[in-house]
Image (spheres, rainbow, N blue to C red):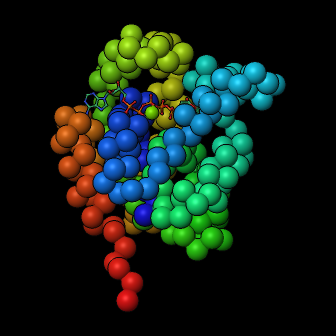
Amino acid sequence: MLIVFIGPPGAGKGTQCRRLVDSLSIPHLSTGEMLRAVKRQESALSRWVASYIDAGRLAPDHLVMRIVAQKLQSDECANGALFDGFPRTIIQAQLLDDYLVEHLKPLDVALELQVEEGILVERLLKRAQIDGRADDNYETIRERLRVFREQTSPLIEYYAKQGKLETINGEQSEEAVFAEIERAIAKHKPSPKG
Ligand code: AP5
Ligand code: MG
């Protein structure tokens, strides 16, 4: 299956994808993790990528799509993938749709995790004390939330129009969110061939 997770910073995209990897046996593709891996290298590209991540702004669409396409072409993704934080703009969604049409792989479902902003800020400031992620500071969190509202939230309507959107209440316990996600995915599971 091919599944997209849409949600603001701190909504629980990574947390829920890590749980789903076991139940669905498909890889977790987090563009945030991929870009942070690029950032850790010492190169002109890594400094360029860092300038986006550290400011809470989105990396360029075509760069992100190139990284994702490389992953999708690997054997690891033969049975699908869980997209965590991708696509994040309408352009990325269109690039992904074009890629999938070309490779005859339909997207099954887009899961929108809804959490209100006060809870998001609280979660991320708490995580900052544990993980020390550079973009988990108050100012950058506000910018990431703004970017989500302006550039990513239009994807909700984009996938609703395709009949692929499922909205999940992300304010529940991790277990309750996971149960709701499993029910939503079951509705979109492709029927076995034959
Ligand atoms: P990315 O790494 O994707 O970060 P994000 O979207 O800001 O989201 P987070 O990872 O902070 O949150 P999450 O939703 O994964 O929540 P989590 O499960 O960790 O992107 C980072 C940057 O990379 C971007 O700003 C951009 O610069 C760049 N980038 C990435 N993708 C890009 C793209 N496609 N295009 C361009 N640029 C891109 O949970 C958060 C915390 O809450 C954790 O501590 C967790 O334990 C806790 N928690 C989770 N669920 C619950 C729950 N139900 N109840 C209580 N606590 C919970
Ligand atoms: Mg994450």
Q: Where residue 149 sits: x, y (%)?
A: 47, 35
- In the picture as drawn, the residue positioned furthest to the front comes out as 75
Name the quadrant of the N terminus: bottom left
Residue 127 seen? yes
Image quadrant in which you'd find residue 63: top right
Image quadrant in which you'd find residue 34: top right
Left or right, 29 with respect to 123, comes to right
Q: Nearer the viewer, residue 166 or 135?
A: 135
Q: Quadrant of ligand 2?
A: top left
Q: Where residue 61 sits: x, y (%)?
A: 68, 44
Q: Nearer the viewer, residue 116 or 78?
A: 78
Name the quadrant of the C terminus: bottom left
93 versus 43 height, above or below:
below
Residue for point 67% across, 52% down = 70
Image quadrant in which you'd find residue 69: bottom right
Left or right, 139 with respect to 36, comes to left
- In the picture as drawn, the residue positioned furthest to the right comes out as 44
Left or right, 1 with respect to 134, comes to left
**Marker count (numbered):** 0
Residue 154 seen? no
Residue for point 33% across, 21% down = 123
Q: Nearer the viewer, residue 180 or 70?
A: 70
Q: Where residue 59 sits: x, y (%)?
A: 66, 34
91 versus 33 height, above or below:
below
182 versus 59 height, above or below:
below
Residue for point 62% across, 52% down = 71
Q: Where residue 144 sits: x, y (%)?
A: 51, 26
Residue for point 35% across, 57% down = 24
